[in-house]
Amino acid sequence: MFAYVVRRLIGGVFLLLLVSLVTFVLFFAGPINPAKFTCGKQCTPALIEQNTKALGYDKPVLEQWGTYVVGIVKGRDFPDDPALKKTAPETIAHCSAPCLGYSPQTSQNVTTELQPRIPVSVSLAIAAFIMWMIIGVGAGIIAALLRGSVIDKALVGVSLIFYAMPTVVTGLLLYQFVAIKWQLVPAPQYVPFSQSPVQWLQGLFLPALTLALYYAAGYVRLTRAFILETLGEDYLRTAKAKGVPRVRVLFRHTLRAALTPIVTQAGLDLGALLGGAIITEQIFSYPGLGALAVSSANQYDLPTTIGIVLVVATFIIIANLVVDVLYGLIDPRVKLA
């Protein structure tokens, strides 16, 4: 198990390097000088040239990428050209490791911008994940056990409605009626857990529910389908014939066998969601990675965009690693070698 995890971690590091290289080529190998986006409407040819040298955009793309990767490990200075450090020392900005770049638009290190936003997106993603797994898997089990009944059809029908409904519509409806009109919960506002755990949980409820209703709709159908498929296996019919209690057959055998594809999908969804739920964060004014991704795209803030891409890729790789490890715990037939 340990050797398997180490190999997967090494593979994940190489994958992150590949993602960063591809992103650099897409953003910095084009005919347009990225320095044109660093000074807004006040850009002059002299200022563009200065920013090009200060940010290293005048170097070959592969050299820029190599400097960026070294900066993640060791940190770096901006500008890192010795000649510029002598002529304009006041423009130097130090970026400690792990350095994900420097944003001229905000005059901040990308790492500094991401640090307060990652806990917001992580809190929202985990809260939504717990809710959609409870709702989706629970409703899927009920629908499978009551196959063909009114309850089964109602659960599947409602799940299709929420699955087809965009999160922007669900979020606005919950915000307008639950929070504002009926005032069942306070208006969502992110409060750090260290400041007030109760307010942190209250602020997460509606945004997490918005995401949970969308994702849970898919898990209702997924869980129902795999449980019905597993219930038809020969070993389960044998267990029932031997008089094994129905609850034991369901939770120890049926659900355990059906969990493998559910865990696979859950890991992928959670990994992507950790990168920021863009629409939901915009609706509820949550200062997470999704909101930062929108603002950086609008401002052509390439360093921040690259940093977000790497953070999202890291979340997805870690989520896939956790899923692979869980395989061995859920299904003993899966050998992690």
Image (spheres, rainbow, N blue to C red):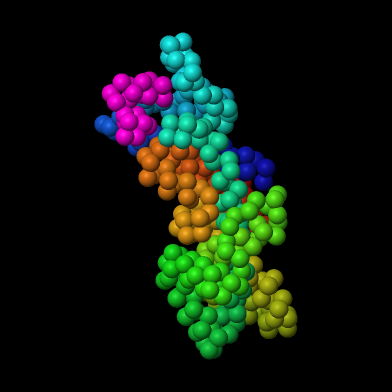
Where is residue 250 shown, x and y percent of the image?
A: 66, 76
Check if residue 40 falls in the magenta segment: yes
Magenta stretch encompasses residue 25: no
Q: Position of residue 272 (x, y in %)?
A: 50, 53
Q: Is residue 285 above or below residue 305?
A: below
Q: Is residue 257 visible?
A: no
Please tell me how many numbered marks the rendered image carries.
0
Vertical arrangement, residue 85 with respect to residue 279, above or below: above
Q: Main secondary structure of the magenta part?
A: helix
Is residue 305 among what the camera can see? yes
Q: Is residue 337 left or right of residue 217?
A: right
In the picture shown, does residue 175 fall above or below 120?
below
Q: State the image coordinates of residue 219 (x, y, percent, origin top left).
A: 53, 69
Q: Looking at this view, is 241 or 204 the one in front?
A: 204
Look at the picture and state if 336 lies above or below 245: above
Query: Which residue occupies 31% across, 29% down?
Result: 43
Q: Residue at x 51, y 48 (%)?
A: 289
**Residue 261 placement: quadrant:** bottom right
Q: Nearer the viewer, residue 127 or 84?
A: 84
Residue at the bottom extreme, as displayed: 150
Which residue occupies 34% across, 29% down?
35
**Along the line of sight, the residue nearer the viewer: 195 or 303:** 195
Q: Which residues are magenta?
A: 35-55
Position of residue 207 measured from the top left corner of the image (x, y, whole percent): 55, 62
- Front in this rendered view, residue 2 or 179: 179
Q: Residue at x 60, y 48 (%)?
A: 119
